Structure formats: C-alpha cells, structure tokens
Amino acid sequence: MMNSRTRRRRRIDLGNTALGIAAASAIGFLYGPIITLMVFSFNDNPITKLPLTGWTLDWYYKALTNSDLLAALWNSVIVAVAAVIICLVIGIPTAFALDRFDFRGKTLFRRLVILPITLPGIITGVSILAFFSMAGVKLSLVTVIIGHGTALTAIVVTNVFARLQRFDRRIEEASADIGARPWQTFVYITLPNIRSAIIGSALIAFTLSFDEIPVTYFLTGRDNTLPMYIWSVVRRGITPEINAIGTIIVALSIVLIFLSVLLIHSDGGTKKKMR
C-alpha cells in the first residue's frame, strides 16, 4: 500500500517537474529576445554582439536627444490618442446598441463589428488604402488615425459589451423609480459600473495603435511614426539606440497592459467582495 502511494507521489512530482520545465521553456522562448534587447541597451559596445564589454546609459541619452526619433515618437502618441478617441466615440454607443436593442440583422452586425480586429493588419491596410485612393484622399497622419480607429474599435465594443452583459439592470430601474432622469442614471449609475471596461479597453487600443506597423505602412504619408522609424533604421542594422528606445517601449507597454487587465477585472473582484 505504501509502495503504491510512493509511486503515485513520484509520478505527481515528475509531472509537476515536467510542467515546470515546459512553462519555463515557453517563457524563455517568448521573452528571451526581449530580455536580450534590454541587456544590450546597457552595453557600451556600439555593435550588438557578445561578449558584453561594459555598462552605460549613453544610448538612452542619445535616443532621447535624437530629434527624428522624438518627432516619430510624438507622432505615434498623437495617432494613438486620436485613435483611442475614435474607438471610444464609436465603440461605446455600438456596445450599448448591441446590449440594449433588438433589431433585424443584429447577429450579422455584431460579427461585422468585430471583423476588423480578426483580419490580418496587411488586409486592413490595403483595403483602407484602396478606399482612400478611390476617394482621392492624400495620405497623412489623419489617414493613419482613421485606419487605426477602424481596426481597433472592436476592442472597445467587445469589452464594453461584455461588461454590460454582466451589469445588473435593476440598479438602473431603481434609479428611475426614485425620479432620476435618463442622463442622471447614465452618469451616476451606468457609467461608474462600466468605467473600468472603458479605461481598460482604451489602454489596450492605445498600446496596439502605438505599436502598429502593417496598417501604418500602407496609410502613412511623409510623417513617420515610431514603429516605422525603428523599422527603417533596423533595415540598416540594429543599433544600441534602437535597443534603448525598444526597452522603454516594452516597459511602457507592460505597464499599460497590466493596468488594462487590472481595470477590466476590477469590477468582478468588487462584485465578489460585495457578496
């Protein structure tokens, strides 16, 4: 009896060890290149190769004093912020329409709304480029903003719609029963309950827009965004400046994604505490 229990425990231990090795291998495969980029951003050798010759912050200083790089960075921020505004203006009413109203073709409409985010970026970029060419619109940051807004609106729609599906509509009914007007119910009852989903999806859309290349490649004019600038520089070889700015972007992206996930799931945690 003891022997069978011992064998079972050993099998469990071996299984746990194998799972641990598999998990560590997966994490190393996914994040190994990023860690390499971060390490070489502090290497004082201008050539990205082993062995490491020393440590320095000079590449960060050069990256943050590069006028072309900073201009591209500012363009990326403008595009991302404007795209987020478009996503929120279109996405929030669309999510309410899908949640609150029944109309003919609702299922088809819902699938069409989320279609842009499921398509490859190159297909979205080529499609929007063809539309702008047909309409005679000159390519610029505005066309990039429209392209990003088109591709990323589905993120806001899906997240806000999912939150509305979990929302207890009886709270709104109680607000109406005590004499609150529709706009008051929305501002003081509905909006606070979906705020985390709105902020979380906005942060995700900002991060994806900031890093977007395929759609930007087809829709940009003379003004570079940061990913396009990095891509053009990397074609001539990886430089420590690119490693430095890449490390900064990775750090900011991790923070934004972490905040978005935290905000999206905060309502669920709050609801459990209330129970």
Image (tube, rainbow, N blue to C red):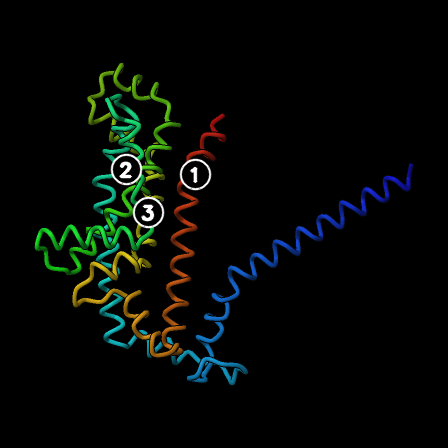
Residue 60: x and y, percent? Answer: 37, 75
Q: Which residue is drawn at 10% across and 55% down?
A: 137
Going by the image, does 50 lie left or right of 82?
A: right
Check contact, mark 3 vs mark 2: CB within 8 A: no
Residue 265: x and y, percent? Answer: 44, 39
Q: What element carries label 2?
A: helix
Circle 2 residue: 113
Q: What element carries label 3?
A: loop
Q: What residue type is labelled 1?
A: Ser
Q: Residue at x 40, y 40 (%)?
A: 264
Q: Nearer the viewer, residue 177 or 90?
A: 90
Mark 1 or 2, which is nearer the eye?
Answer: 2
Nearer the N terminus, badge 1 or badge 2? Answer: 2
Residue 112: x and y, percent? Answer: 28, 36
Circle 1 residue: 266
Q: What is the CA distance from the residue labelled 1 to the residue labelled 3?
A: 30 Å
Going by the image, does 62 lie left or right of 49?
A: left
Q: Which residue lies furthest to the left in this view?
A: 136
Query: Label 2: few (<14), some or many (≥20) within 10 Å?
Result: some
Circle 3 residue: 119
